[in-house]
Amino acid sequence: MMNEIKLMKEAFSFLIENGCAISVEKSNVEYCVTYFKSDKQIVLSYDLRQHRFDVGIRNVKGSSNYDATYLPLLETDVGDTIQKEQLIDALNVLYHQAETDWTISKKHFSEIVNAYAEFVKNNLSAILIYC
């Protein structure tokens, strides 16, 4: 049995080391781990129906968590362009490999989460400035 939240928290533990607080929400359709630093948020979500992991950013200054605009990281222009292209290529390969899984395997899930974590770690300053 895979513990997705534990794997997400382990891969992104560097955010705690960089002064972020953490919040975890769990429902029957999605797991969400949110890292906070001031009014900035880095949001990790795993859709249990579609078996998709995503990372987004929010700026909650002057609004509640639910009113703040969520920006999927891959749809922003934040971070190193070459690294982002490499991340997108890696994710495409991993999701293609996982297509035959009835549910995503621990191996594929870990590799997807770790690919995102590496990008966030390498571009953390830019991400926190962007949002």
Image (spheres, rainbow, N blue to C red):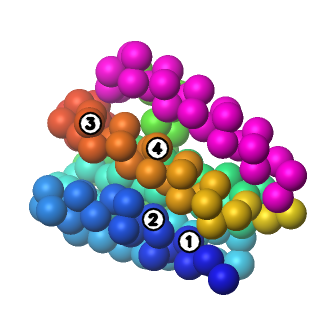
Q: Is residue 56 visible?
A: no
Tell me the element at label 3. Answer: helix
Q: Which mark is residue 55?
A: none
Q: Secondary structure beneath disc 2?
A: helix
Name which residue type carries label 2: Met
User: Eyeballing the image, is 19 above or below 130?
Assistant: below
C-alpha separation, residue under disc 4 versus residue under disc 2: 11 Å
Q: Earlier in the sequence, mark 4 or mark 1?
A: 1
Looking at the image, do the residues carrying marks 1 and 2 touch, with CB atoms under 8 Å apart?
A: yes
Which residue is labeled 1 in the image?
A: 4
Mark 4: which amino acid?
Ala
Query: How far apart in space, not on screen, are marks 1 and 3 (Cα)?
Result: 23 Å
Residue 129, quarter of the rendered image:
top left
Callout 1, which amino acid? Glu
At 21% from the left and 65% from the top, the residue drawn is: 16
Looking at marks 4 and 3 on the same chain, the residue that comes earlier in the sequence is marked by: 4
For disc 2, the marked residue is 8
> Is 76 within the magenta?
no
Left or right relative to 27: residue 49: right
Range of magenta residues:
78-101
- Mark with earlier residue (4, 2): 2
Which quarter of the image is occupied by the C terminus?
A: top left
Q: From the viewer's perspective, tell me whether residue 113 is left or right of residue 42.
A: right
- 3D distance between C-alphas at marks 4 and 3: 11 Å
Residue 86 against residue 54 in the figure, above or below:
above
Residue occupied by mark 3? 122
Task: Indicate the position of residue 39 as horizontal and vertical percent values.
Answer: 23, 52
User: At label 3, which amino acid type do we have?
Assistant: Asn
| Between 52 and 1, the one nearer to me in the picture | 1
Marks 1,3: beta carbons within 8 A: no
